[in-house]
Amino acid sequence: MDGILNINKPPGRTSFSIVSFVKRLSGVKRVGHAGTLDPAATGVLPVCLGQGSRVVPFLHDTAKVYKAQVEFGVTTDSYDATGSVTATGDPTGVSRKQLVSALESFRGPIQQTPPMYSAVKHGGRPLYELARAGIEVERKSRTVQIYRLELKRWQPPVATIEVECGKGTYIRSLAYDLGQLLGCGAHLKSLVRLKYGCFDIKDAVSLPRLEDGFRNGDWTKFIYPIDIVFQDWAAVVVDDAAEADVRNGRPVELKPGDDFQPEVGRLRAYNGDGRFLGVLTFNREKGHWRPGKVFNTT
């Protein structure tokens, strides 16, 4: 069974527990998720089955959209509502105008420091293990991309924002940094992932509905094909000889056509029967296409 489930993760469940749930009920041995959501967070969690797990790196490179509630005046050690309060401040002086101006500072490429309660590793250990042991270490800031950041509602002391961002972005850190910039502190009160690449919360399946599908034997109707992740890529149909080359990882000679030019740099490839073969990347130095990842789907 190869494909991807778009699951609407409920609050209070870990991403790992969702994977275990799918693995146990589906009987598929190879199951994984494409991006952790904190237990308190909800929303889109792509769960990949079989060879679907091999598209995870490509999913990581896609944009995510979140709806977040940020509460000002209270700072926590985890940067969210599950943590212990470390500081309090007075948010009454924060106006909508000040908040909108502060958000401007976080658009585009920004430097962000991961929270201590995160899976980022330090000396081979996840930061959250150190945090639980009462150990705080210096973390290196890193560049993340905020494509869009909008204030949806301001009901003091809580701001509802919508964030479209690239990989590695911590919305908890964004909430913390907003609070520091405005001088009163803040933490992430709630978080919903609305979109993850091509997956939208409007199409996500709930766990009860998915469980019904397992019980009724029709759960596979919720599975998306692997190539949906590459739906925005140009596509090419190859002949039998080129198909053999792709399957064996050999370079493929393709003539540019109406559907693609070498400048696109990458393609999704299909055989004459419409079966998805894999992704190709263009080697500009040698002038040929090379299989980047091949999928032996049935």
Image: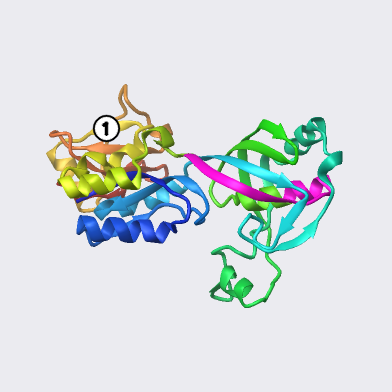
Q: Pinpoint residue 229: horizontal percent, then vertical percent.
A: 35, 40
Vertical order, 175 against 139 (above or below): above
Residue at image coords 67%, 76%: 135
Is residue 20 left or right of 73 when viewed as pictured? left
Task: Identify the residue at image location x=26%, y=32%.
Answer: 236
| Position of residue 217 measured from the top left corner of the image (x, y, whole percent) | 15, 46
Does 5 sit left or right of 141 as displayed?
left
Bounds of the magenta segment: 177-194
In the rendered image, the residue lying farthest to the right is 93
Q: Where on the picture, by quarter, is residue 220?
A: top left
Residue 291 forms part of the magenta stretch: no
Asked if residue 32 can be seen in this view, the reply is yes
State whether residue 240 is above or below residue 12: above
| 254 is higher (above) or lower (below) than 15 | above
Tally of numbered discs: 1
Most extreme residue toward the top, as rendered?
258
Circle 1 is placed at which residue position?
236
Secondary structure state at the residue bearing disc 1 = strand
> Does the magenta portion include 185?
yes
Neighbour class for label 1 at 10 Å: few (<14), some, many (≥20)?
Answer: some
On the image, the x and y values in percent for residue 75 come to 74, 56
